[in-house]
Amino acid sequence: MAKPLLLSLALTTLQLHVFVTNGFSASTVQKRSGRNSFLQKHEQPHSYKRTPKHNILSPDELHNLAISLSKRKPGSNGFNRGWIQYRTAALDSIRYHLYKSGLPHPAEKASFEELFFNLGVAADRGKMPSFEDAGARSGYAVEFFCRAKNLADLFADTFNSHYEFPEYWLEGLRGSPILGSSDGGAYSVVSLGGGPGFDYVSSAVATSFCSYMESLRDQEETGSLSSSSLKLHATILDYEEGWGDLVHAMVHSTQTILERSTPTLSCDWGGKCDITQSIFHPSNAACSLLLDSTNLWVCQYCVAENAQKLQESNFIFFRELFQHAQPGTLFVLSEVHPRLWPEFYELLQDENCNMEEVGFNKRGRQMLLRKSSSDVITTSQSTKNSPALSEKDRKLLKKFIELRKFHERKIDAGWQRQEPKIRGAKD
């Protein structure tokens, strides 16, 4: 009995092996082995149910689906259901095309699982993990399409009466080609920490869907929107420059699947960006050049993992971004937790930020802002230049402060994120 016991202990020790990456523990244990893992379903097709085949559509099939939904009135239950149907099919088809035809490096499941665990630790500790492993980046690109889903839903939900958004922010977004409006000019979206390009996918899918809606097209003086009048361009910036090839692959898959759509869509890999440095630092040269031309800035899931350096820098990047962005600019900040939003709200008190209104969506997972369309502080702002905040969001802000204090006490007490347990292993 001794040998089997020793062998079992050896295997358990091997499975629970921990090594150090960037100053914190990383797990080699399989992290995403459940039914929601894209890689798991496609690497072990007999053990897990794959994405339903009816959700994988060709460009023509997606085009025909959009036409069948095009007469629905924005805001109606039918429109909301149609959006979910279209968004699901579009994102599933783009992801499948990327996985089968577009990945510049094979997705490595074990490397991705290590990165996935490290991302959780990074959100806890405020220190960014490494994205150097190409196989892990490919795994991230096919596993985390929820990032594209969440932002795309934010755009479409502006028509949904069940959601409450800041009025100024809502007004600004509804005047964009993302939601079917067009003044004939180009609309620019910049994605901060945006590798592998999910924010472009979100914008492209929402723009594509809304371009088919007859009631939206009827609002235009011409009665329709030509492909030349809807121009949306995205620029992807990231600290890890290795994302560049994956961004190109993501753009190719997106444009392949949406090729029958009306809008003119384009996206570029913009290069290096470091949100812990001044926006005028050499590492942010590409970013600073976009200040005068960007309509929408998106930063998803980059704040928490950089919390320590952001705080040490007094949030200089975002402070300068808010100050120097053009009037009327929109901002979307998304995070896994809302603990840093109170500090962001404090920096918005700076008179040079000139924000009209701030609001929260998805119980604080998204922070929405719009810069004043003029240089004059609006009457809705207080004498301290605070942007307008609804009573509901003011209560949420107080809860976020309590969450931050609770988390700090927990970390100070020595709490650490644990590795996932192995099924069948004994303590």
Image: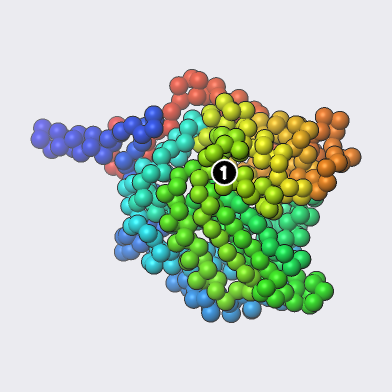
Left or right: residue 163 versus residue 121 is right
Q: Residue at x 80, y 71 (%)?
A: 219
Query: Considering only vertical position in the picture, is 269 above or below 264?
Result: above
- Residue hosting label 1: 285
Residue nearest the observer in this picture, 377 or 87: 377
Say which amino acid is labelled 1: Ala
Residue 205 point in image, percent of width and height: 59, 65
Callout 1: SS: helix
Q: Position of residue 260 (x, y in %)?
A: 57, 76
**The quarter of the displayed image where residue 31 is located:** top left
Graded by Cα atoms within 10 Å as few (under 14), some (14 to 19) or many (20 or more), the crowding at tag 1 reads some
In the displayed structure, does residue 128 sit left or right of residue 356?
left
Residue situated in front as seen by the camera: 305 or 316? 316
Quadrant containing the C terminus in the rendered view: top left
Q: Which of the 4 quarters of the picture holds residue 116? A: top left
Q: Is residue 128 visible?
A: yes
Figure quadrant of the N terminus: top left
Does 150 appear above or below 70?
Answer: above
Q: In the image, residue 10 lies at what x, y percent?
A: 18, 35
Residue drawn at point x = 61 percent, y = 61 percent: 233
- Is residue 360 at least partly visible in the picture? no
Which residue lies most toward the right here? Answer: 379
Type of colouring: rainbow
Q: How many marks?
A: 1
Q: Nearer the viewer, residue 196 or 269?
A: 269
390 sits to left or right of 135: right
At 66% across and 40% down in the image, what residue appears?
321
**Residue depicted at 48% across the width and 32% down the height:** 127
Residue 232 in picture, x, y percent from top left: 64, 63
